[in-house]
Image (spheres, rainbow, N blue to C red):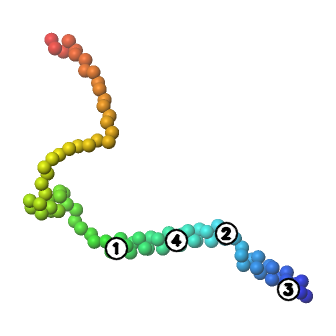
């Protein structure tokens, strides 16, 4: 009798700790995506929407910005040189 109870207990424990099937994994992934989408949608809804501006004039106060020096700095330099040939027949 004790061996039957022990066998039944082992069977119950083995089925209780079974590995997840593909169905369970798919449900978990889809559930996570759904929860993430809901959270992102709520956060997006809280953003303040503004109208796009065509230039930065509305962001600056009058006479508060003055450019005194202008430089350009390039991180990379690509030079392409092409020799232009003089066509003597076109000049005539």
Pick whichever of labels 1 and 3 is earlier in the sequence: 3
- What SS does tag 4 mark? helix
Residues packed near mark 1 inside 10 Å, few (<14), some (14 to 19) or many (20 plus): few
Q: Secondary structure at mark 1?
A: helix
Q: In terms of depth relative to the viewer, which is nearer, 30 or 83?
A: 83
x, y (%) of residue 33? 50, 69
Q: Left or right: 82 with respect to 91? A: right
Instruction: Provide the residue designation for mark 1.
Output: 45
The Cα–Cα distance between marks 2 and 1, rounded to whole angstroms, is 36 Å
The structure residue drawn at horizontal position 89% and vertical position 83%, both measured from the top left corner, is: 3
Viewer-side residue, 66 vs 2: 66
Q: State the residue at coordinates (17%, 58%).
A: 56
Between label 1 and label 3, give the one nearer the viewer.
3
Q: Which residue is mark 3?
A: 5
Residue with the mark numbered 2: 21
Q: State left or right for residue 44 relative to residue 29.
A: left
């Amino acid at each position: 009798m004790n061996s039957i109870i022990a066998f039944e207990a082992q069977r119950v424990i083995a089925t209780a700790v079974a590995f997840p099937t593909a169905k369970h994994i798919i449900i978990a992934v889809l559930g996570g995506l759904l929860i993430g989408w809901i959270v992102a949608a709520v956060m997006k809804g809280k953003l303040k929407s503004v109208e796009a501006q065509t230039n930065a004039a509305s962001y600056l106060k009058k006479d508060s910005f003055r450019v005194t020096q202008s430089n350009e700095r390039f991180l990379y330099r690509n030079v392409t040189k092409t020799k232009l040939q003089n066509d003597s027949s076109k000049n005539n």
